[in-house]
Image: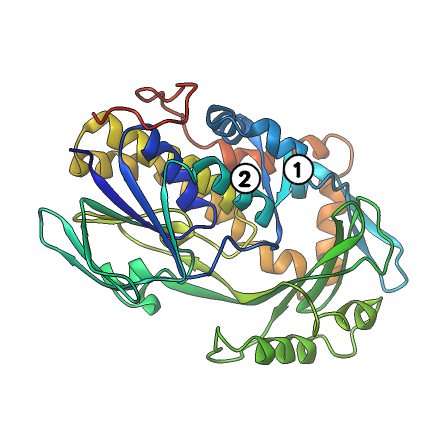
Amino acid sequence: MRKKVLISGASIAGPALAYWLARYGYEVTVVERAQSIRPGGQAVDFRGHVHLSVLEKMGILEEVHRRRTGNGDLHMVDDQGHDLVRLPASFTGGEVEILRGDLAAILYDLTRDAVRYVFDDSISELVDTGDAVRVTFERGVSEAFDLVIGADGLHSNVRRLAFGPESEFVHDTGYHVAIFEAPNRLRLHRDVMLYSEPDRGLSVYPIHDDTAANVMCVFAADVGNIDRQDVDGQKRLVAGAFAGMGWHSGQVLADMAEAPSFYFDTISMVKMDSWTKGRVALLGDAGYGATCGGMGTGLAVVCAYVLAGELAAAHEHRTAFAAYEQRIAKLTKACQQVAGGVGSFFAPKNIRRRTWTFKVLTAGPMSRFLDKMTTKAATAIDLPAYPAADVGSSAPLDPA
């Protein structure tokens, strides 16, 4: 009998894992609270041979390249728009950069025929009986699964139900981020503009063949508890935090109120001693994520490959889960160390110090160090070869 796996979350990590598990013969269900695959979102990147090799094994590397953003260098500018520092495209975009929504669509199309997707629903209760996990859904009927995987992001529902309250694991860095889509009023072509004042920074980069732009706002503040469902309240908070900012900030932020897509969250780190418990495991941001800047998308895709591969190699979850945790430990630590500096990069307390630091890092031979620094974390794993990992068909294999 085929083993049944429930994955919570249909963004990136969940469908990536679903792809591999279906290939190994598992019966996979993905449950997602949203009504469909979510469009929009920030640009995400893949860098280094580890990321690219997994995309190639999945057969999507060519499509990711085809739908890449094509963004160029990052310009740190002053209030007059003059360059302070220019960082190479590889620093922010790696070897290939793509919008999160476009990548999610690719993964959904790749898996939709082999995987059961259940939208507009969520898990309300998990009971691990030792032999299975009994799952109660908010809308659907209860069902038993051999394994449950939480791939449902920083505010993971599975983590809360199986491991404990979010406050035990999610640690706020003091920074917040908002990302929204707007018209390309600055008429940008390829390059990214970043303007910063103490404790707040605003970046703008063109998307959709320069017809629109993604705006990213990062700011440091103590704003207390934020209602994650109150989008209008979040927009008011961002507008207040950036009121009176120089450069083109007023013009750019004026489009936030009617933005077709909007994302807001704290910049936080998930810290856990273990990512597995009984028949439940966490993948991606749910277990070892950072809100942004830690190469979380590449990390999720690589770790999905490892988790599925270990399950296929071990034939049972205890050994597989232990091997999964051991194999990805160094990689997750390295990526979180990179993510730890994202708030101060976009919204430093001392603009001159940040400018001087990156002028040094982009000068002469130091530029090679900068490039190495951006890829070292992404390659901090020896990627194993798993059973049938290179099979050319996406049809489910016979179960091990």
Q: Which corner quadrant of the image does residue 325 belong to?
A: top left
Q: Which residue is at a point 55% across and 54% down the rendered structure image?
A: 292
Mark 2 secondary-structure assignment? helix
Is residue 351 left or right of 230 when viewed as pictured?
right
- Decide: few, some or many residues near mark 2? Use Cα within 10 Å; few <14, some 14-19, many ≥20: some
In the rendered image, residue 70, in percent from the top left (x then y), is placed at 73, 38
- Whether pointer 1 and pointer 2 mark residues with C-beta atoms closer than 8 Å, the reply is yes
Residue 159's place in the image compared with 320, above or below, is below
**What sort of colour scheme is used for the picture?**
rainbow
Distance between the alpha carbons at the discs numbered 1 and 2: 10 Å
Is residue 328 left or right of 83 when viewed as pictured?
left
Residue 49's place in the image compared with 82, above or below, is above
Q: Which corner quadrant of the image does residue 371 belong to?
A: top right
Mark 1 secondary-structure assignment? loop
Q: Is residue 163 visible?
A: no
Amino acid type, mark 1: Arg
In the rendered image, residue 6, in percent from the top left (x then y), is placed at 28, 48
Q: Which residue is at a point 18% across and 29% down the rendered structure image?
A: 315
Q: Which residue is at a point 41% across and 64% down the rendered structure image?
A: 171
Q: Which residue is at a point 67% across and 58% down the rendered structure image?
A: 346
Foreground residue among 380 and 281: 281
Foreground residue among 129 and 372: 129
In the rendered image, residue 33, in percent from the top left (x then y), is placed at 41, 61
Q: Earlier in the sequence, mark 1 or mark 2?
A: 1
Q: Which residue is mark 2?
A: 106
Foreground residue among 345 and 122: 122
Indicate which disc residue 67 carries. Answer: 1
Amino acid type, mark 2: Ile
The quarter in which the N terminus is drawn is top left
- Decide: few, some or many residues near mark 1? Use Cα within 10 Å; few <14, some 14-19, many ≥20: some
